[in-house]
Image: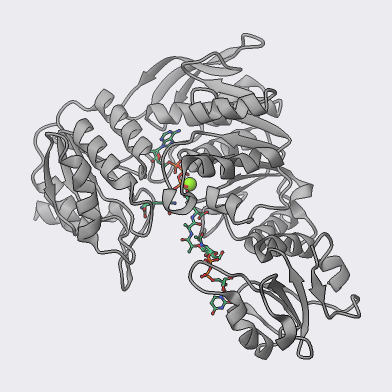
């Protein structure tokens, strides 16, 4: 692509380019991916600084270097083409969207944001859209999908270049609508700039990621960006931050259980393997009885978010019901992995205080015997949520097993100590078993009649990230192998 087309809309502070008709083959934000004729965009990151790899990029054939405003370009002047801009993360978005010719303008784009429920809601929206005849693309934590084809996901929301490339692939495969998770990191780090959002959906906002955002107000401000960018908005009115969005955008479609809303659920009944409720639209008094195969009161909220999004798009209630009912399961979300005469084991991805609280409220409704909760907290993530989760665990469970969940570069024992600060405020009975495999084995070996055992935090994940390595760890397999071993 010619430079002048590639940089359309890019803020340019300084450049040595004389001929903007020169051709650029492709774009890279890591020097390791640069090839002959590429543009290399330097990003000052949290771990390292892309500007330090300029020489490597030039050696690999970079033709154009995009640098940030703090960078002294005198070293580049006679060596390579360069452009200085005020924010290279923004530049990566602008240039990537130009390079792939703004693919998201060609299809309906729905963004879902919020602390919890994004993955679940996107699965439900996809199902409803498919029910109404669309070919749908999905982007999120568990996987990316083009129709039924699956593509591995590295992030909840990909880096802007990878995202625009994925959109481009989707467009090539005639996808007519895309539903994606929009993480607060992606909003803050300009990964989703230049996306043409038709609908923005808000699930909820509760504590998480304060290591990154600092305060709840900053976290909320990051989320708000999605609604500034979207043509239509769908908002949970039962959530206090959702009500703030509605004050800013009064024309939002609202949903809720406890408040008056455009779309609401009534007569909610929770079961161990499903929920039932009456789905209602306020303006025309339409209603349908819905049976949802994903348990948990939180799943009713996610279903409402999905139903309201479909309502905003003009999809009728019968199609919405059929779409919701055809979601059979969402990997790692209240997934029953064992249910026998003695006990039940559920795995779930709850990894925030609110997620854990909602999960345990649901367990409380359906468990016949003891509620046994096994969980840990992620390393290199918000530390302040650890004691809060410890306290919730202690209050909500009859027995707690504290263990590890992706300790990353941190000492697992230190993470557990942070959890215990909250747990020890309660009278809960607990044990600490840092090795998650051993912890699960303990839960199964010591199970009592009618125990409801919850393995929280890892959900669909198939790994455990340790300091020096990542090991394969799929809780579904782990449970199966322990049960096999104990049978012998
Ligand atoms: C905090 C954060 O989000 N960091 C992301 C950010 O990293 P960074 O900018 O700090 O990158 P860096 O490692 O310092 O490197 C700086 C630059 O040097 C470049 N480089 C580096 C090495 C080299 O040899 N050559 C080179 O050019 C890198 O490509 C990069 O452009 O940009 C990288 C490239 O896109 C991301 O991989 C990285 O995600 C890290 C790994 C991460 O863990 N992110 C999590 C927190 C995240 O984003 N999570 C959210 C979901 C949260 C939720 O579920 O609510 C998500 O959307 O996935
Ligand atoms: N609407 C909700 N409100 C509160 N908790 C929820 C809600 N939906 C899901 N949860 C809890 O959060 C967990 C994660 O759900 P889900 O994967 O849908 O959220 P997410 O927002 O995509 O998470 P992530 O930020 O990791 O991408 C679930 O396993 C459940 O325990
Ligand atoms: N997207 C979330 C997932 C957390 C899942 C949990 N297993 C952990 O590693 O903390 C994050 O990166 O914070
Ligand atoms: Mg997700």
Q: Residue furthest top?
A: 285
> In this image, 241 relative to 175: left or right?
left
> In this image, 6 relative to 142: left or right?
right
- Count of marks, rendered view: 0
Instruction: Identify the residue shown where x is 55% and y is 13%.
Output: 260
> In this image, 477 relative to 11: left or right?
left
The quadrant in which residue 232 appears is top right
Q: Quadrant of the C terminus?
A: bottom left
Is 100 located above or below residue 431 in the figure? below
Instruction: Identify the residue shown where x is 15% and y is 28%.
Output: 369
The quadrant in which residue 306 appears is top right
Q: Residue 404: x, y in percent?
A: 25, 56
Q: Residue 46: x, y in percent?
A: 50, 66
Q: Is residue 465 visible?
A: yes
Front-lying residue, 264 or 328: 264
The quadrant in which residue 88 appears is bottom right
Q: Quadrant of the N terminus?
A: bottom right
Instruction: Identify the residue shown where x is 30% and y is 61%.
Output: 407
Q: Residue 75: x, y in percent?
A: 71, 88
Q: Residue 292: x, y in percent?
A: 45, 27
Q: How is the image coloured?
A: one colour
Front-lying residue, 358 or 287: 358
């Amino acid at each position: 692509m010619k430079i002048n087309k590639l940089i359309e809309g890019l803020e340019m502070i300084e450049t040595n380019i004389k001929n903007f008709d020169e051709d650029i083959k492709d774009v890279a934000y890591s020097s390791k991916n640069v090839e002959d004729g590429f543009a290399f965009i330097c990003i000052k990151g949290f771990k390292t600084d892309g500007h330090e790899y300029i020489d490597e990029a030039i050696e690999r054939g970079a033709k154009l270097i995009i640098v940030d405003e703090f960078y002294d370009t005198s070293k580049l002047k006679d060596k390579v083409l360069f452009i200085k801009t005020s924010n290279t993360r923004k530049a990566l978005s602008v240039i990537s969207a130009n390079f792939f010719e703004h693919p998201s303008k060609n299809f309906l784009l729905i963004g879902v944001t919020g602390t919890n429920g994004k993955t679940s809601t996107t699965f439900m929206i996809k199902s409803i859209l498919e029910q109404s005849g669309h070919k749908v693309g999905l982007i999120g934590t568990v996987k990316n999908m083009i129709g039924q084809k699956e593509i591995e996901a590295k992030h909840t929301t990909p880096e802007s270049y990878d995202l625009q490339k994925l959109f481009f692939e989707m467009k090539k495969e005639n996808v007519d609508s895309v539903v994606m998770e929009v993480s607060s990191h992606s909003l803050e780090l300009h990964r989703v700039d230049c996306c043409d959002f038709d609908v923005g959906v808000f699930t909820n906002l509760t504590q998480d990621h304060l290591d990154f955002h600092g305060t709840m107000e900053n976290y909320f401000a990051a989320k708000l960006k999605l609604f500034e960018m979207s043509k239509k908005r769908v908002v949970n009115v039962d959530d206090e931050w959702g009500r703030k969005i509605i004050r800013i955008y009064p024309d939002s479609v609202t949903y809720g259980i406890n408040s008056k809303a455009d779309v609401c659920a009534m007569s909610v009944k929770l079961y161990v393997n499903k929920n039932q409720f009456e789905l209602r639209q306020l303006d025309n008094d339409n209603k349908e009885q819905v049976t949802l195969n994903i348990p948990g009161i939180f799943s009713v909220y996610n279903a409402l978010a999905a139903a309201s999004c479909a309502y905003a798009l003009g999809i009728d209630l019968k199609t919405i019901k059929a779409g919701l009912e055809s979601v059979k399961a969402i990997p790692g979300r209240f997934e029953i992995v064992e249910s026998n005469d003695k006990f039940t084991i559920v795995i779930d991805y709850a990894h925030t205080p609110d997620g854990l609280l909602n999960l345990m409220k649901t367990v409380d409704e359906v468990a016949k015997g003891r509620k046994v909760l096994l969980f840990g907290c992620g390393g290199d993530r918000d530390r302040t949520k650890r004691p809060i989760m410890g306290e919730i665990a202690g209050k909500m469970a009859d027995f707690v097993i504290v263990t590890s969940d992706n300790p990353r570069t941190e000492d697992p024992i230190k993470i557990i100590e942070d959890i215990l600060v909250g747990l020890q405020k309660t009278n809960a009975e607990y044990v600490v078993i840092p090795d998650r495999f051993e912890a699960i084995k303990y839960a199964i070996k010591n199970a009592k009649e009618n125990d409801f055992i919850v393995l929280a935090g890892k959900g669909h994940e198939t790994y455990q990230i340790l300091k020096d390595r990542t090991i394969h760890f799929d809780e579904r397999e782990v449970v199966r192998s322990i049960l096999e071993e104990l049978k012998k």
